[in-house]
Image: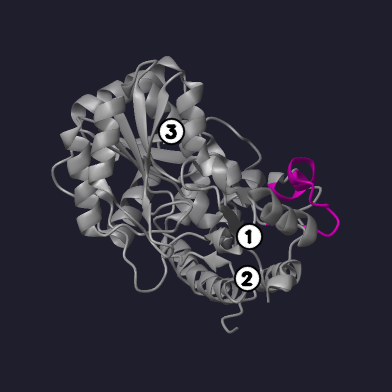
Amino acid sequence: MTAHDPRFDPIIDRRGSHCVKWDMMEQLYGVPAEDGLAMWVADMDFRPPACVTQAVQDQLDHGIIGYFGNDTSYRDAIRWWMQERHGWSVDAEAIFTTHGLVNGTALCVDTWTAPGDGVVLFTPVYHAFAKVIKGNDRRVVECEMAFDGTRYTTDFDAWDAVVEREGAKMMILCSPHNPNGRVWTKAELEGFAAFAKRHDLILVSDEIHHDLVYPGQTHIPMANIPGVEDRLVMMTATTKTFNIAGSHSGNVIVHDDKLRAQFAKKMGALGLSPNSFGLFMATAAYSPEGAAWVDDLMVYLDGNRKLFDAGIDAIPGLKSVALEATYLSWVDFDATGMTREEFTNRVEKGARIAVNHGPTFGKGGDSFLRFNIATPRANVEDAVARMQAAFSDLQ
């Protein structure tokens, strides 16, 4: 496989570094730390671009870690990135900074719904959404996506019936989608917008994966779909794009005056203010140097994607759903005829790979496992070889 890159090829040993992805896999999945592969938590095994690490070093060299003031350059960097990379014009005053987007999701749920209210999820979907909905004493309203064995699509007729039956006040859209890697088309986004209006729902669009899009695909921000301005809340972050999840920094972007005032009040009531390191890192990342790094990253991830898909699809009964975005491969084991416990055991005990279990993503996830392929090429090659060995009796 071509497209090797000295920035992404080196295997950096993350064990013993308080890394949840590598240090917790034995405790949580029974995969041995000494020779297991961690392919579960959605962070990358790559260093961020030099401009980001230099921003942190500059603060350490200065030596005083104080409160962050005058965030104009930070807001300007966000605005530049969204306009330059996504064709989306963002007002500076619309930007709020949260402690990551799980925190941002929880704040949205707390701001615009009440205990007992329903929140729509299009499942299978990122498991933290359901966690914070339930943690806030709201109801998860699952609208299962249509799946033809190859690709996920919308099913608004079925979803209308679900919401009419169960009631809801908010919907959370994952765009691009995690875990199936869909990049929603303009027509599909217009459908989601109409669905939100039809049921009078606040539309929270989590677009944290918007920079991680493969060749031939174009991400369209929901903010560029007309007609939902009065109910739209956008969520974005540098953390997934640049592998700086530990900065716990994210943006909730709200252009509607009424919604913005409500969110500002909630942030103020909770006394929330951002981590200064996260702001310095985001400002450095959202730059021409950061953009060039992301472009090279996607070339590398595309090579990983092709290698992983070919290796997994060569195993009878396994199917890796074709990714349009993200580095999170969604593998279907349904055609093996195995129980969930059996194929999961083969992956974790046989192949010694820690992965996310499909049912945690909601309805439609039972026959799936999620694999993180944002790791050096050698690890992907190793994972494919382990999987083929673990399922060798099917070949």
**Disc number at residue 126?**
none
**Mark toward the viewer: 2 or 3:** 3
Residue 61: x and y, percent? Answer: 66, 47
Name the residue nearer the viewer: 47 or 45: 45
Which amino acid type is shown beneath numbered disc 3? Gly
Judge whether 359 appears above or below 215 on screen.
Answer: above
Q: Residue 85 occupies which quadrant of the picture?
A: bottom left
Crowd around label 1: few <14 · some 14–19 · many ≥20 (10 Å): some
Q: Identify which residue is drawn at 52% across, 61% down.
A: 327
Q: Is residue 93 visible?
A: no
Furthest toward the front, the residue is 337
Q: Distance between the residues labelled 3 and 1?
A: 25 Å
On the rendered image, what quadrant is the N terminus found in? bottom right
**Disc number at residue 104?**
3
**Magenta segment range?**
21-38
Residue 37 covered by magenta stretch: yes
Instruction: Please tell me which of labels 3 and 1 falls first in the chain.
Output: 1
Q: Mark 2 points at which residue?
A: 7
**Disc number at residue 47?**
1
Residue 38: x and y, percent? Answer: 71, 55
On the rendered image, what quadrant is the C terminus found in? bottom right
**Relative to 318, is 15 on the left or the right?**
right
Name the residue nearer the viewer: 132 or 10: 132
Furthest toward the bottom, the residue is 2
Crowd around label 2: few <14 · some 14–19 · many ≥20 (10 Å): some
Crowd around label 3: few <14 · some 14–19 · many ≥20 (10 Å): many
Which amino acid type is shown beneath numbered disc 2? Arg
Q: Identify which residue is drawn at 40% across, 19% down.
A: 268
Instruction: Please tell me which of labels 2 and 1 falls first in the chain.
Output: 2
Q: What element carries label 3?
A: helix
